[in-house]
Amino acid sequence: MTRQRSHSYRQPGVVLTDHHFGVPLDHTRPGGEQIELYAREVTATGKDPERLPWLLYLEGGPGFGARRFTGRQAWLERALADYRVLLLDQRGTGRSTPLNRQTLPLRGTPEQQAEHLAHFRADSIVRDAEAIRRTLTGGAPWTVLGQSFGGFCATHYLSTAPEGLTAALITGGLPSLDATATQVYEAAYPRIERKNLAHYARYPMDAERARRIAAHLADRPAELPGGYRLTAEAFQSLGLLLGTGDGSHQLHYLLENAFVTTAAGPVLGDAFLEAALSHLSFAGHPLYALLHEAIYAQDPAAPTGWAAERVRAAHPRFDAAKTLDGADPLLFTGETIHPWHFTADPALAPLRDTAELLAARTGWQPLYDPARLAANEVPVAAAVYHDDMYVDTAHSLRTARTIRGLRTWVTDEYEHDGVRASGPRVLDRLLTLLDD
């Protein structure tokens, strides 16, 4: 593995250092093609980094680079008291050989692109982390903090390379060890419906607003800036907001100013369309759409097969056309990816064939080892959110019971993004659990 260290620079209260690493695309072929990874080291001003243990942060997703903090924002404030923090852009994201509609065609045909993307799941991410750890720490283990999908990666870490870990901290990211993508979405739709009903209970006026917007789009789909095609189904996917701490309020404010009056009558206003685009476009994180169902794939014989779309058919209350023909409130969808995403979004449209091949792909390997987790000796603490819209609470608690020694904090004080919304407190609670 190669490593390049850039110069250090400062922000208020912190010293930042950029690191670049060369790792194999396929870790089973260490002499094959190499890709570049990027990570940002953060230490508190005035502390000697050589005297601090490392904490590796794995972002949620898939498909998001590590958050770009300014100074000691969010959970960094607490982490920097005890750790030297490494913010890793997981492979394919941020500055780590990013993959998108512009770069994936360099891999060749859709078949070659899909084969390439098979190397961008949690198993490869953890092997990247292990290669980096051996280079940075001289072989000493480190602590990992995994948020959401980052927690899935941390669970894989515990399954395959626990010797690399001093401790594992997981926030909103304890995965089912054996649920298929279909089972994940069978559990998800009832949760999403509960979040919808809670939203309408808080903002009853939004029921009529949402129906009016969906009816307008059913007759006249809108083109957003950049060419995104906003249909009624695409509008429903704004429900992704409902799983975050202030998401219900954001959705309410978005809906209240949707229409403006023109000479031709009411139309969806530019401000609404621009704001909707900021929540709907995958331009900044296309791997989220491409690999979302693949993160649940563990049966070598079974494709994911557009699981969210198939399961939606068994939940007709999420069918916009049927809802508009009746009197029920429109239900927004949540963390679900559908084939229409790859026609509506210009950032995904060139990758539609690749997405179809990934949905049909077989040969996915198991990501977790229940037997090894049952014998776990690494200290682990996990925040489990009581009615998490993104990660099923029952699945998380079943996994928590499997991992030997894991301490859980189950709370309804925060939503899925609790470590972002109140990071110092959430992280401090988990660190306290490790010490109990």
Image: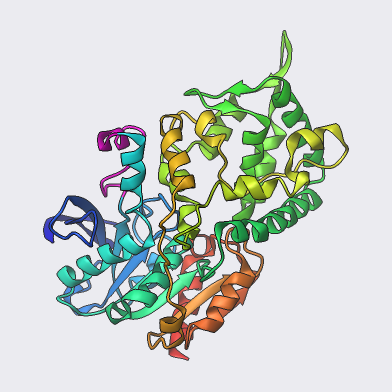
Residue name at image x 54 percent, y 76 percent: 399
Q: Is residue 243 above or below residue 367?
A: above
Residue name at image x 48 percent, y 44 percent: 289
- Assign the N terminus to one quadrant of the image: bottom left
Q: Is residue 13 left or right of residue 300?
A: left
Q: Is residue 329 left or right of residue 372?
A: right
Within the image, what quadrant is residue 300 found in? bottom left
Residues in magenta, as a range: 92-108
Foreground pick, 360 / 114: 360
Residue name at image x 73 percent, y 30 percent: 213
Q: Is residue 401 left or right of residue 146?
A: right
Q: Residue most toward the front?
A: 301
Q: Is residue 81 above or below residue 333?
A: below
Foreground pick, 173 / 351: 351
Q: How many marks?
A: 0
Q: Residue 46 at what x, y percent from top left?
A: 22, 70
Q: Is residue 346 visible from the viewing direction of this image?
A: yes
Q: Is residue 434 above or below residue 246?
A: below
Q: Residue most toward the right?
A: 327
- Main SS of the magenta part reads loop
Q: Residue 13 at what x, y percent from top left?
A: 30, 62
Within the image, what quadrant is residue 271 found in? top right
Q: Residue 408 at what x, y percent from top left?
A: 54, 80
- Colour mode of the rendering: rainbow
Residue name at image x 49 percent, y 84 percent: 406
Q: Is residue 385 visible from the viewing direction of this image?
A: no
Q: Residue 336 at what x, y percent from top left?
A: 58, 48
Asked if the magenta segment contains residue 403, the reply would be: no
